[in-house]
Amino acid sequence: MNDKSDFRQFTPGITMIDVLRQHITNRLGKLPDNVDVVLPHFEERITKRGDFLLQPGEVCKYVYFIVAGCLQVFVTDKHGMESTREFYIEEQWATDIFGFQNQTPSSEYIRCAEPTKLLQIHYESFQKLTKEVPQFGAIYKQILEVSYNNTVYRVNTLTSMDALDRIKWMMEHKPKIMARLTSKMIASYLGISAETLTRLKSKI
């Protein structure tokens, strides 16, 4: 993977805020009248592959909107083995949902799996906007629902599958992730070893 080519190419003149504005429009069906109250609260952030946005013990202060790139949310066991809860790519939102909402220390890592362009909003601004701008609160509710439903669906689905079927499921349902990330990261998401992933992929 080439860091310089990992960023999505934008139409000339399209800014990161423009991407978020269009995303909000798509979510709500139209651009809300008070969108210009919301957008200035977002800060641009550009990261390198491997940068951490959050580590265990830290309090998550931001919700991230991904303009380009990929974030990995994961935990580790006592041996340092990673277990990935989710990968988030372009035009998705990521945070430690419960830690952010309650402002309590996190048990999760959030790491940039690729060079990533983000728009981030701080907890205080987020809380203010969810109270003052109903449409923004509706988007947050969608974020929670989508994140929860995706995690529950994946866990329930993969639990009943053997390793080969898990890989086939990943290829069918998340081909972009499969193509973009390392075998180690994919394996941590599927709950198998990287060696098993490599061996079984050759049989498909």
Image (spheres, helix red, strand yellow):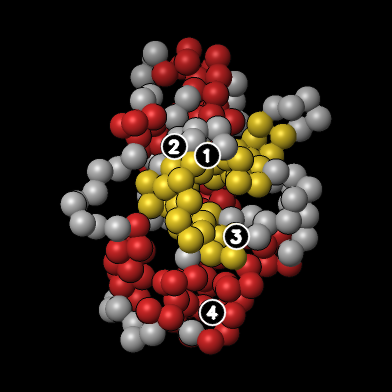
Picture coordinates of residue 148, whole percent (x, y): 57, 59
Pointer 1 and pointer 2: residues touching (CB < 8 Å)? yes
Measure the alpha-carbon separation of dots 1 and 4: 26 Å
Indicate which disc residue 112 carries: 1
Q: Secondary structure at mark 2?
A: loop
Pointer 2 and pointer 4: residues touching (CB < 8 Å)? no
For mark 3, what is the residue? 62
The residue shown at (34%, 39%) is 7
Location of residue 17 by image quarter: bottom left
Residue sitting nearer the eye, 39 or 83: 39
The residue shown at (67%, 67%) is 101
Give the position of the C terminus as an image quadrant: top left
Measure the alpha-carbon separation of dots 2 and 4: 29 Å
For mark 2, what is the residue? 115
For mark 4, what is the residue? 129
Q: Say which label, 2 or 4, has the lower sequence index.
A: 2
Eyeballing the image, is 137 above or below 10?
below
Measure the alpha-carbon separation of dots 1 and 2: 7 Å
Instruction: Say which amino acid is labelled 4.
Output: Leu
Total labels drawn? 4
Residue sitting nearer the eye, 190 or 136: 136
Q: Say left or right for 190 vs 17.
A: right
Picture coordinates of residue 39, whole percent (x, y): 42, 72
Q: Is residue 161 visible?
A: no
Picture coordinates of residue 179, whole percent (x, y): 36, 29
